[in-house]
Amino acid sequence: MSNARPNYKDLELRVGFEIHQQLDTEHKLFCNCPTRLVSDEELRNSPRFVRFLRATKSELGEVDEAAAFEERRKRVFEYIAPSPASCLVELDEEPPHEMNREALLIGIAIAKALNANIVDEVHVMRKIVIDGSNTAGFQRTAIIALGGYIDDPEGRVGIQTIAIEEDAARKIEERNGIVVYSLDRLGIPLIEISTAPDVKSPEQARRVAEKIGLLLRLTGKVKRGIGTIRQDINISIKGAPKIEVKGVQRLELIPKVIENEVRRILGLLKIKEELLQRGVTEEQIQNRKPIDITDILLKSSSGFIKRSIRRGAKAYAVCLPKFGGILGRELQLNRRFGTELADYVRQWSGVGGLIHSDELPGYGIDKNIVESIKEKLGCGDNDAFVIVVDQEPKALDALNVVKWRCIEALRGIPRETRAANPDGTTRYMRPQPGAARMYPETDIPPITITEELLREAEKYRPPTPDEKAEEIIKKFAISRALAWQLIHSEYLNLFEELATEFGNKVPPTVIATTLVSTLKSLLAEGLDINKITDEHLRKLFAAVAQGKISKEAIPEVLKLWCKEPALTIDKIIDKLSLKPLTLEDLTRIVDEILMKHQDYVLSRGERAFGLIMGQVMKVVRGKIDGKTVAETVKKRLHEFLEKKIT
Ligand SMILES: [Zn+2]
């Protein structure tokens, strides 16, 4: 794989994206439940329900390909319905209520800020979703604006549609064909902004996504934290279909995902060319049948394979004519063509994975066994083969999926929906859904956009970044640098709330610094700052405001919460013995340390300050502010010297 940067202009790279951002409304989009996620404990104590979903034909008489794919997987869906954050609407046992007005107003304000045209009438539609993430089998979505644009130095990027829709249920776990979802997230309003495929480089994609993200945050009405903003990226280059990549959660991954996806497409185009040069035909692949090689693999030294076979699994293999060397070809970092095949069989057949000839000998399969397999399959030196170990029908099914994917390799790039991996590579998820997956929501009448609604939406108009900076500098007396850091962080809204509530007792600069730098340094130390909720921060600053802890203790408290989020603030104060020191206590500690080091102090005089200060801080850190400590040490050191010298 070459690491040279491709020429995106020559490749005619076109990127568009869909940004989904949760809105911070009080209630859900179609019911009165609050828009909050419940704790793990609430989740454990909530009732569960089981549902099956199946694909139905749309009004055009077609079964959506993505829906058919899901049905084939025959998964069972289990729903947890936490009563503080779900009702009969989420369970699909009660019709949806009217669309939440606040969500609509925020949506209109955002659409106007993106120069889009608001529709005259909003029609709620049902979009078929049968991965179980929605109890009804569809997601409600409503276009509120069309057109619009966002300017960028590399060129204007059009906005195609802006919609308000309901978020899906929250996936908790998946095991043995059972997927467990929590209904707390289902129905939280989202705004979906779809851009035109006008983005021409990975860097431009990042800039535009950042700009839109900032505009959304400046409304002050969007949620923050992991999973509250998700981007789907559509990528195409010359000679290849559009590929959808779902679920990019961090902006900095956007350029990486695009680069990786382009690399993969180019790699696949090269593989196609090479296979055609080698003279591979679809029939040659089609004619190869999976063959039972269980006896041969019993001689391998792989504990895993032998255990599976003892439990009743079979080993099957299929020869892939003239595919020698292709399966080991790297398409993205540590992801080979063989990895693509493995993703396909995992998704379509539910088997755990496969072994291919380009990675053998290995996995306890030695050279002799490889030779026996090749002989049994009738594989020549330029051929490749794939092994699957599983129950017989599943293994056979998986190998047919392998053949099908290899035939696709001769045709070019399959139209796929892929998922983003945390490192910015992508993996196969499912076929792309067709257009035939929308139909009208009959339970909700169309909403006319009146002049009154438009006027009311004005109050949600996001200020420009400059306007916002001036506003918070003036209101909270923080530095310009800190103001800009806040604006570019996800904590702006929270800062305003906390500074308004506690600003007269806790300096707003301390609140801002905690949000934009203390949390960041905890993250850099490897702590899981996602465990820290707004509620934690509110309790923290309340404790500082009440004088229960000093502001110096803030990092220590947050650190402990990252590890034990369930602890109350009083427990933490106890545990870390954070009760603030009185000046009297401090003076006593300083004197003790001076006595302990008296020889050193007497020989060094005032220059002993550094050592004494260090020793005192070891004892009092987090319990009293550093300035007071320094003043006290200086004063007592001086007095100590005076007394001893005279
Ligand atoms: Zn509800």
Image (cartoon, grey):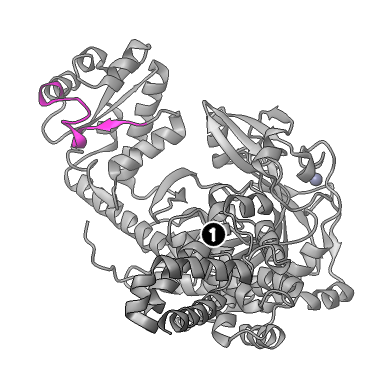
**Residue at left 64%, top 40%?**
40
Q: Is mark 1 within 8 Å of ligand 1?
A: no
589 is within the stretch colored magenta: no
**Residue at left 78%, top 58%?**
123
Q: Nearer the viewer, residue 125 or 153?
A: 153
- Position of the N terminus, as image quadrant, is bottom left
Q: Is residue 273 visible?
A: yes
- Residue 622's image quarter? bottom right
366 is within the stretch colored magenta: yes
Q: Is residue 197 visible?
A: no
Q: Going by the image, does 42 lie left or right of 282?
A: right
Q: Which residue is mark 1?
A: 556
Quarter of the rendered image showing ligand 1:
top right
- Position of the C terminus, as image quadrant, is bottom left
Residue 514, position in %: x, y?
A: 57, 69
Q: Nearer the viewer, residue 534 or 397?
A: 534
Secondary element under disc 1, as helix, strand or loop, is: helix
**Residue at left 63%, top 64%?**
580
Residue 157, position in %: x, y?
A: 53, 76
Which amino acid type is marked by label 1?
A: Glu
Q: Going by the image, does 430 lie left or right of 457?
A: left
What is the magenta range? 353-369
Q: Nearer the viewer, residue 230 or 238?
A: 230
Q: Nearer the viewer, residue 639 or 187?
A: 639
Residue 366, position in %: x, y?
A: 14, 25
Q: Residues within 10 Å of mark 1 (few under 14, many from 20)?
A: some
Residue 81, position in %: x, y?
A: 74, 37
- Residue 393, relative to residue 459: is it above or below? above
**Residue at left 72%, top 53%?**
188
- Residue 41's image quarter? top right
- Residue 60, relative to residue 348: is it above or below? below
